[in-house]
Image: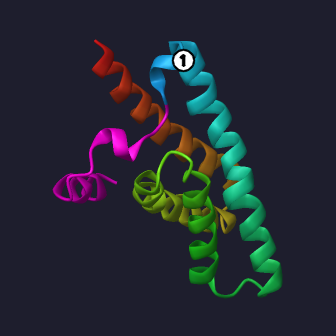
Amino acid sequence: MIPLAFALELLNVGENEIGGIKADEYSFLGLIISVVIAAPLIETLIFQSIPIKIIQKLVNNRFNLFTILISSLLFSFAHYFYSVWYSIMILPLGVLLALTYLIFQKRKESSYWITTYVHGLRNLIGVILILTERI
């Protein structure tokens, strides 16, 4: 996501145009619960688990590239309400989460929970960066 943020900066797209969560509207605990816990739990189910399983059934577990593309685009479009720029910037995370889900389907660990942890960790890093700007 950093290279995309750099590219957006080169295009003179400011932070206000990119958008994102309005951290000032949340307490620290509110950010942790909504962004680090709830969002990954819900989004992993809606944008990785369900679409990937449906697509795999429809195409008999083939075409992982297609599966990754659909899951990633769904994840990206779901963040469009922040802005088109945010949606574009979040697309690589959608790819990472779809890949994580697919990789861990082949292992004994739960693909849902591992993907949720990866998503939550990424969001935690974002929350920490947002909170350090408040100081």
Residue nearer the viewer, 78 or 112: 78
Please report the residue visible at 46 percent of the width from the left and 39 percent of the height from the top. 20
Inspect the image, locate mark 1, and give the three-letter code of the amino acid beneath it. Tyr
Quadrant, the C terminus? top left
Q: Is residue 129 magenta?
A: no
Residue nearer the viewer, 23 or 97: 23
Figure colour scheme:
rainbow
Is residue 110 something that shows in the picture? Answer: no
Please report the residue visible at 62 percent of the width from the left and 28 percent of the height from the top. 34
Q: Is residue 14 magenta?
A: yes
Please report the residue visible at 73 percent of the width from the left and 59 percent of the height from the top. 49
Residue nearer the viewer, 122 or 46: 46
Is residue 41 something that shows in the picture? Answer: yes
| Magenta highlight range | 1-21
- Considering only vertical position in the picture, is 126 above or below 61? above
Please report the residue visible at 57 percent of the width from the left and 32 percent of the height from the top. 35
Tell me where residue 58 sits by quadrant.
bottom right
Quadrant, the N terminus? bottom left
Helix or strand or loop: what does disc 1 sit on? loop
Q: Main secondary structure of the magenta part?
A: helix
In this picture, residue 43 sits left or right of residue 88:
right
Residue to which mark 1 is pinned: 26
Instruction: Residue 19: give x, y in percent of width and height.
Output: 42, 41
Q: Within 10 angstroms of label 1, few (less than 14), some, or many (20 or more) residues?
A: few
In this picture, residue 57 sits left or right of residue 25:
right
Instruction: Residue 67: give x, y in percent of width and height.
Output: 64, 76
- Considering only vertical position in the picture, is 49 above or below 41? below
Residue nearer the viewer, 64 or 110: 64
Instruction: Residue 46: give x, y in percent of width and height.
Output: 73, 54
In this picture, residue 18 sits left or right of residue 23:
left
- Considering only vertical position in the picture, is 57 above or below 101? below
Instruction: Residue 111: give x, y in percent of width and height.
Output: 68, 56
